[in-house]
Every structure is written in C-alpha cells, then in structure tokens.
C-alpha cells in the first residue's frame, strides 16, 4: 500500500482522497510511476484561478483552453467570458474545474498504466 503524501505531497482536499483511493492497491514502484505521470499532467488550482482572473482584463477563456475545453474557450473569447458572467461563475468554481480535470487525468494515467501491464489497480478509486 503506497502512501499518497510521500509520492504527491502537493495534493489536498478531495483530490488527495481520490488519489489515495487509486494508490491504495499499488506498491511503491507503481505509485511512484503513477505520481510522475500524474504530476506532469495535472493542473494546479492557483494557475486556474490566475488564468480565470485574466478574463477581466480581456483574456477571457484561457483557463478553459488549459483545461482542454477548446469550444468553451473560443466561446469565452468571442463573448468576453459570456459578458463576464461566465468568468465570474468560473472564478467561484475554479477549484472544482481543476478537480474535475485532474480526476480525468488520473483515470487516463491509470488506464495507460493498466494497458501497459504496469498495475492491477485499474478502476479503483472512490468516485
């Protein structure tokens, strides 16, 4: 059983609990590999917050591009963040936007590892 804080000390809150559920069936080597890939691909809450705040200065939608939501990013650019209302809503929900993206990245990383035969923990976690 791998210790999530030893491999990913920067995690907190719901993300910490979710990743802990994924790592519980892995040994230290598998957890270390997962942590390397996951850390490289995850997005930090603070980065999403800063990019969202840039929406008030004419750069609306940058956070949506970073989160892989290209369609919404283009819509935000063309409508000034849906007349700033969408930007304000995203500003309030920036942590959940980052969390949802990071959970998707965790699943992709886990499925990549399991398809390569590197782990038997596929599908574990507490949704």
Image: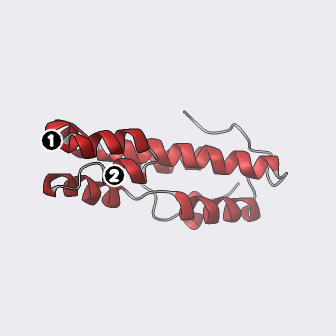
Which quarter shows the C terminus?
top right
Residue denoted by label 1: 84
Within the image, what quadrant is residue 29 found in? bottom right
| Residue at point 80%, 45% (across, down) | 120
Q: Categorize mark 1 by other alpha carbons within 10 Å: few (<14), some (14-19), many (20+).
A: some
In this rendering, is residue 30 above or below 74?
Answer: below
In this rendering, is residue 59 above or below 100?
Answer: below
Q: How is the image coloured?
A: secondary structure
Which quarter shows the N terminus?
bottom right
- Apparent side of residue 48 relative to residue 89 in the rendered image (left or right): right
| Residue at point 21%, 58% (across, down) | 54
Cα separation between marks 2 and 1: 14 Å
At which x and y percent is residue 16?
Answer: 49, 51
Q: Secondary structure at mark 2?
A: helix
Within the image, what quadrant is residue 34 found in? bottom right
Q: Residue 40, labelled with which disc?
A: none
> Which of pointers 2 and 1 lies earlier in the amino acid sequence?
2
Q: How many marks?
A: 2
At which x and y percent is residue 66?
Answer: 41, 54
In this rendering, is residue 8 above or below 24?
Answer: below
Residue denoted by label 2: 63
At which x and y percent is residue 59?
Answer: 23, 56
| Residue at point 25%, 52% (across, down) | 52
Q: Residue furthest top?
A: 127
- Residue 106: in sight, yes or no? yes
Within the image, what quadrant is residue 85 found in? top left
Asked whether 78 or 21 is in front, the reply is 78
| Residue at point 71%, 45% (across, down) | 111
* CB-based contact (under 8 Å), mark 2 and mark 1: no
Q: Secondary structure at mark 1?
A: loop
Asked whether 48 or 20 is in front, the reply is 48
Q: Residue furthest front?
A: 78
């Amino acid at each position: 059983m791998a210790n999530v804080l030893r491999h990913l000390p920067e995690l907190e809150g719901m993300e910490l609990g979710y990743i802990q559920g994924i790592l519980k069936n892995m040994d230290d080597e598998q957890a270390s590999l997962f942590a390397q890939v996951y850390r490289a691909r995850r997005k930090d809450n603070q980065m999403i917050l800063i990019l969202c705040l840039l929406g008030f200065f004419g750069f609306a939608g940058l956070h949506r591009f970073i989160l892989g939501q290209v369609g919404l990013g283009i819509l935000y650019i063309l409508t000034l963040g849906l007349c700033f209302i969408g930007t304000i809503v995203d500003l309030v929900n920036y942590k959940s936007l980052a969390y949802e993206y990071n959970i998707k990245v965790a699943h992709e990383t886990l499925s990549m590892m399991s398809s390569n035969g590197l782990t038997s923990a596929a599908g574990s976690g507490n949704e």
